Image: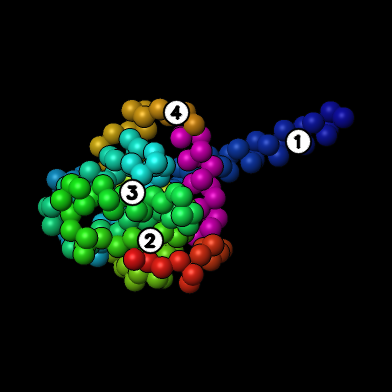
Amino acid sequence: MKKFFKFVIKIISVLISSLVIINIAVIAYSSVYIKKEDKLTENYDCILVLGTSVNGKEPGALLKDRLDTAIRLYNCKQSRYVVMSGDGIDKYYNEPKAMKDYAIKQGLEDRIIIMDEGGLSTYESMYRAKELIGVCKPLIVTQKYHLFRSVFAARCLGMDAAGVAAEKTAQDYPSALYRHTREFFARVKDFIFVFIRPEPNYMDDVEIK
């Protein structure tokens, strides 16, 4: 039994070490491509805003900060288009629609907004941006803790991606511990996904408006 428990402990130690190493690798790789708003010197195909929970038809705190950041970047002429990517599969729950409505209220024109309603995950948003919308050089907007994984996935999928962090950090929002824990494992998931390249859940039957 002692040998068995030692073996189990070794396996757990190797597993935990692997998860930590993957997280460190993703963060280290992506950090180079995360830019300050006032230090941007290039133009991009689009400003790609990643969706998250909405309250009814209104963006939550996380999403509102992403949208406000994207709107500033658009007004600074960093790109001619804004892509809203998130979960819009259920007719009763639509992140990109709420994102678009909010942005229009803040002065963005309908014609410059592209809605991707099949971005059910970060990986799927990146995959669909490249393969369905034809994005080659996105400027990704989300909170910094999430930006490392987003930029990593985009670049591994062949896009010349950079990212700008929404103003606040995860600690400024409720459930910071949950978000960081979830992100720790999500980085590992997407690290695997960019190598095995599974197709998103939706590719042809969800219209990009």
**For marks 1 and 2 on the same chain, the one whose residue lies earlier in the sequence:** 1
Label 1 CA crowd tier, 10 Å (few <14, some 14–19, many 20+): few
Which SS class for mark 1?
helix
Residue at left 33%, top 41%? 58
Q: Give the main secondary structure, helix, strand or loop, of the magenta stretch.
A: helix
From the viewer's perspective, is the residue at label 4 or at label 1 nearer?
4
Residue 96 placement, left or right of 92? left
Find disc 1 in the rendering and name its residue.
8
From the viewer's perspective, is the residue at label 2 or at label 4 nearer?
2
Q: Mark 4 is on which residue type? A: Ser
Instruction: Tell me, for residue 98, which label it has, or none.
Output: 3
Find disc 2 in the rendering and name its residue.
116
Furthest residue in direction front, as rendered? 92
Label 2 CA crowd tier, 10 Å (few <14, some 14–19, many 20+): many
**Is residue 18 visible in the rendered structure shown here?**
yes
Report if residue 57 lies within the magenta region: no
Q: Mark 1 is on which residue type? A: Val
Label 4 CA crowd tier, 10 Å (few <14, some 14–19, many 20+): few
Find disc 4 in the rendering and name its residue.
175
Q: Where is residue 142, by image quadrant?
A: top left
> Cβ–Cβ below 8 Å for labels 3 and 2?
no
Label 3 CA crowd tier, 10 Å (few <14, some 14–19, many 20+): many
From the viewer's perspective, is the residue at label 3 or at label 2 nearer?
3
Measured Cα–Cα span from mark 1 to mark 3: 47 Å
User: Residue 200 at what x, y percent from top left?
Assistant: 51, 63
Q: Mark 2 is on which residue type? A: Asp
Q: Mark 3 is on which residue type? A: Ala
Considering only vertical position in the picture, is 182 above or below 117? above
Tell me where the magenta segment starts and ends, as one range: 179-194
**For marks 3 and 2 on the same chain, the one whose residue lies earlier in the sequence:** 3
Measured Cα–Cα span from mark 4 to mark 1: 32 Å
Residue at left 30%, top 62%? 114
